[in-house]
Amino acid sequence: MKIINPASSIEALQERIDSLNSALASEQKAHQVEKKTRIELEWKLKELLARLYKPGSEKISPDQLQLILEGFAEDAALAETGSDGEEVPDPAEGAPGKKRYPSKRTVFPANLPERIIEIDLPEDEWICPITGEARAFLRWEEP
């Protein structure tokens, strides 16, 4: 049987604890450096995204606007005369050979009596409870 000296085992354990503490300290320092680097990179990314998508990033020069307007004018001229120079029929008139169907909107007979109904608020509801101002008249429909 081997006899273990308690003083030497305590010293060995103390050395082991010291080495683990120093390893932990170095790992914590490395973690702090990585965390700081990650935070800096996230801020740079946010700044670059803000610069990329800011409202003024897509500016159009006046020359580009002039080109767009010229393109619209050319399209309008082609639409009026057609590509081969002949007149294009108005789509509202309908193409020849196509049957136009009347609208399904109901037309009221002229002999129906017409009544105007006004619904007025009581005086205690004339003032808006939120803003405290007098409520405005919304609309009047003419017959």
Image (spheres, rainbow, N blue to C red):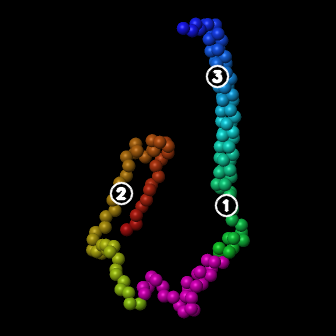
**At numbered mark 3, what does the secondary structure look like: helix, strand or loop?**
helix
- Looking at the image, residue 61 sits to the left or right of residue 142; the answer is right
Name the image quarter holding residue 127: top left
Q: Earlier in the sequence, mark 3 or mark 1?
A: 3
What's under tag 1, amino acid-wise? Glu
| Residue 13 in picture, x, y percent from top left | 62, 15
118 drawn magenta: no
Which residue: 59% across, 80% down?
A: 75
Q: Earlier in the sequence, mark 3 or mark 2?
A: 3
As drawn, which residue projects farthest toward the front?
Answer: 1
Which residue: 66% across, 12% down?
A: 11
Q: Nearer the viewer, mark 3 or mark 1?
A: 3
Q: Nearer the viewer, residue 113 or 6?
A: 6
Q: Is residue 32 visible?
A: no
Q: Earlier in the sequence, mark 2 or mark 1?
A: 1
Q: Nearer the viewer, mark 3 or mark 2?
A: 3
| Residue 103 in picture, x, y percent from top left | 35, 77
- Mark 3 = which residue? 20
What's under tag 2, amino acid-wise? Glu
- Mark 1 = which residue? 58
Q: Residues within 10 Å of mark 1 (few under 14, many from 20)?
A: few
Quadrant for the N terminus in the image: top right
Quadrant for the C terminus in the image: bottom left
Residue 118 got which mark? 2
Q: Is residue 40 visible?
A: yes
What's under tag 3, amino acid-wise? Leu
Label 3, label 1: how many angstroms apart (C-alpha)?
56 Å
Which residue: 67% across, 36% down?
A: 34
| Residues drawn in magenta | 70-95
